[in-house]
Amino acid sequence: MICNPVLTAKAKPLAPVIPDHELKVRDWRQLHFSIQWIYRGKVSDQGRGHFSGSCGLSAWYIQRGEGLVRHGEVEKRARKGDWLFPNRGTHFRDFSKDAEILSLRFYIEWPDGQPLFHLRESVCFPGTKYPDLLRRAKAMERVVYKNGRRSYSSSGFMDEKLSFPDYLDVQDVLLQWSKALYHAFTSEGAGPSLERFEDERVVRALRVLDGWPLHRAFSQRQLVEQVGVSRAQLDRLFTAKLGHTACQYFDRRRLRHAQRSVMLADHPIKEVAFDVGFRHVSSFSAWFKQNTGVNPNERRETLPSFSKRRK
């Protein structure tokens, strides 16, 4: 039976580690890269106000006017020519009435949804400081807007049909953007969060959990046998490095996959439920709502241009 703990406990913040930390190729391969949208223009009313910032990362290059992000007592203000990256978590954002931006929404994250860059505070710096970042963003914009595509909603780009060469072009510019972002963030003291790889026992367990099919319950007995530690010790190690137990980690993987899939307009909710191990949509919906606060259809309906709901 798949363990279904309620994921209300927040993972403890992950601290940056030294730049250029090396991992094995098989570990880097667990990273998920995707772009949710990229557009250039004025800021809509939907882009102002309070946000949770729990999924993905946003980047704004200010082309005109000003933008700000406030988190607690900390405020970061960006002017023309600046990059502004809002912190991950609850924050308030606003822009001047004349603001025009180049906006990107993207994911660089581990299988459980934890980002490679865990921004506790918003990051702001002049675009001239890291010119390659803007070059890569513009290259991404050219590729995404190929063949006259228009701006995308939160779900639009992932629903686009691409040829294999076009898909590779998108992935190529996204990886180049990620490389430029890595250089900028590490230089600003906001490097990647890699604590999960500091203990070889945790790494071995992660490799088992990351390779386990989401529709199947994993065997905790088999897991601890492969890792060579007791269940209690493994849970202590996971809690220390990731902020949750091994069982919760696997459930976070399932939830993250479900969240991404629900945002795809052409993916029926029933199929999403089956993908993560539920036989009944009602059980899946209850689990999804218990962990996100909304049911799958409600989550899908919050997307700006959701075209057609399928159940």
Image (cartoon, rainbow, N blue to C red):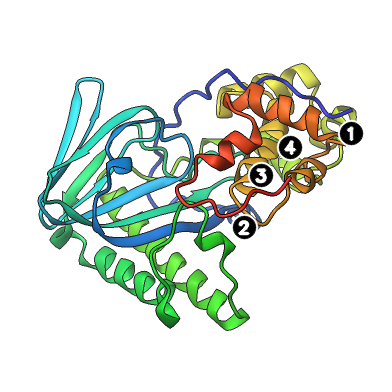
Which secondary structure, mark 1? helix
Which secondary structure, mark 2? loop
248 relative to 60, above or below: above
Q: Quadrant of residue 162?
A: bottom right
Q: In the rendering, which numbered label is found on residue 203?
A: none
21 relative to 40, above or below: above
Percent across and percent down for residue 171 are 51, 69
- For disc 3, the marked residue is 257
Category of crowding for the residue at label 2, using alpha-carbon neighbours closer than 10 angstroms: few (below 14), some (14–19), many (at least 20): few
The amino acid sitting under disc 1 is Gln
Category of crowding for the residue at label 3, using alpha-carbon neighbours closer than 10 angstroms: few (below 14), some (14–19), many (at least 20): some
Mark 3 vs mark 2, CA separation in Å: 17 Å
Percent across and percent down for residue 230 are 80, 21
Select label 3 or label 1 by which is in front. 3
- For disc 2, the marked residue is 29
Which secondary structure, mark 3? helix
Mark 1 vs mark 2, CA separation in Å: 23 Å
The amino acid sitting under disc 2 is Arg
Q: In the rendering, which numbered label is found on residue 222?
A: 1
- The residue drawn where x is 66% and y is 57% is 266
Mark 4 vs mark 2, CA separation in Å: 16 Å
- For disc 4, the marked residue is 205
**The N terminus appears in which quarter of the rendering?**
top right
Total count of labels: 4
Q: Is residue 40 left or right of residue 223?
A: left
